Amino acid sequence: MLAEHRLKEKKMSYYNLAGKTLLVTGAETGIGRAIAIRAAKDGANVTAAGINNEGLKETLELARAEGAEERFLALVVDIRDAVQVQKMFDDTLLKFSRLDATVANAGVMIERRPFIESTHEEWHHVLSVNLHGTFHTLQAATRILRKQGQGGDLLVTTSSNAVRPGPQASSYVASKGAIHQMVRALAVELAPEKIRVNAIVPGLTLTPGTQNRPGHIERGIKNVPMGEIVMPEEIAALVAFTLSGEAPHLTGTDLKVDSGRTSA
Amino acid sequence: MKTRLSGKSILVTGGESGIGRAIVLRCLSEGASVVIAGINEEDISKTVSDAEADGAKERISAIVTDVTNSEQVQNAIDLTINNYGRLDAAIANAGAFCASTPFGEWDIDEWERVINVNLTGVFYVLHAAAKVLISQGEGGSLIATGSSTGIRPIPNLIPYTSSKGGVHQMLRGLAVEMAPHKIKVNTIVPGMSETRPVMTQQGYVEAGLKSVPMNEIVKPEELAAFVAFSLSDEVPHMTGTLLKVDAGRTSA
């Protein structure tokens, strides 16, 4: 079921991101960690932000193992707090002097439960992280990119659930649908400034978040035509391609790796 | 960069010019073997000699192919296997454009010409290629060139936008159907791109750019870079994806 055997060639240093500074939220685990490490391997300066310090330390260790420690800044940040988000960007500029790309990746998943049993607390919690936190992150990043006046990249991790919802996760689906459409609107609004805005659309992906939920992968894989789970490294590779500058007019695109989930 | 696609054997229809040519040259530069199935002999010669000048003589072949003729399409597939031993990807890129015409004024023959090349031609190519990929049993890629007008139509181009809309949905269906065979199926979605049909139609670019948020033309090389990435072994689960580079056209 897993893909590792089909990720034949681990040519993970293909794109040259040297000199670029990338900020990734939710970098303490899963897709965010894979993006941060891949970008570091490709030569970028990386700010890895996360709410879980233990996980961030592990991410930092992985960067160190790649010899990227000098180009790697780990920051504990709660993106629900706009003040902390601003400080995260201030610290990034202090260390790396510029910003080229921001990946608003931090998000929460929830336990599945029927709509009528979901609570207001859960609704507000999910939206405060996935929607408000993403807004804080993108707005602060946009201010910097605009000031620099050289374009740049904004990426947002949405979900294949934003395109094809699964049941019993209405607050999660709503939050991901909202940021998915926010990406599209920002792609249009920021295009004149050559700021590119793209959505990362993972299918069912092998992360601690999906692995730690009993039955989640077994249930979900039934809706995946290829019958295989997506590896975080695949998504990280697609992000590296996007940041490479090989396609300067790539904006408003769904960067989708989902084993066909949203096609069926 | 020089080896990511080495060992792969790729057929590109319409590979003699525009986006197809860019894909051919990009795949060669990454080590693939490539067959151009094209219809314009002058453009074929030029692209082949450019590839040879880049040192890819052993890895480039070409065959004159009308994609509306299924026998000729089969010949192109056969040539690929004959020359390079296998097929890893087929890129059904050959397409026909048409002159801007109000709906009531279309010549029925023009409708049929465009549908035959853009929709039936894609079917012939992917159909023949899928048989090979399935029998090889090692996955592979099927790609076709759609259009941003397949998502967001331009007026007065009904045969073209209809054909491209058909391509988009054909590939979505194929992504699902081919998934159990581990065959990736993805659609190239160019925005207004720097190709001959676009650049030579009077006033087309000026009018079209007004609906492009970034207000710039897309280069064929950008699409070729995305295609090469999708063909690589770094993303075995990237299927049913739109390889869209459109400067924001379909977002607005």
Image: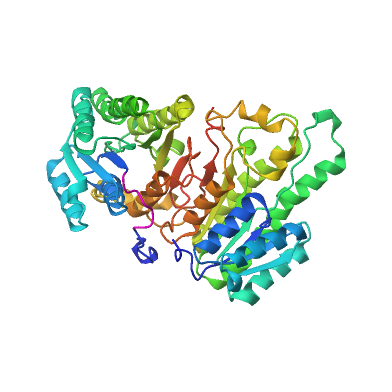
Q: Which residues are magenta?
A: A13-19
Residue at image position (19%, 54%) is: A62
Q: Of all residues shown, which one is farthest toward the front?
A: B53
For the image, the number of numbered tags is: 0
Q: Is residue A249 above or below residue A141?
A: below
Residue at 72 percent of width and 66 percent of height: B63
Determine if the magenta segment contains residue A17: yes
What kind of secondary structure does the magenta stretch mostly adopt? loop
Among the 4 quarters of the image, the one containing residue B92: bottom right
Q: Choose between A26 and B202: the one closer to the eye.
A: B202
Q: Is residue B130 visible?
A: no
Camera-nearest residue between A30 and A196: A196
x 24%, y 35%: residue? A97
- Within the image, what quadrant is residue B42 found in? bottom right
Q: Please tell me in which quadrant of the rendered image residue B123 appears.
A: bottom right
Q: Is residue B145 left or right of residue B139?
A: right
Image side of residue B61 versus residue A221, left or right: right
Horizontal and vertical percent for residue A49? Answer: 21, 38
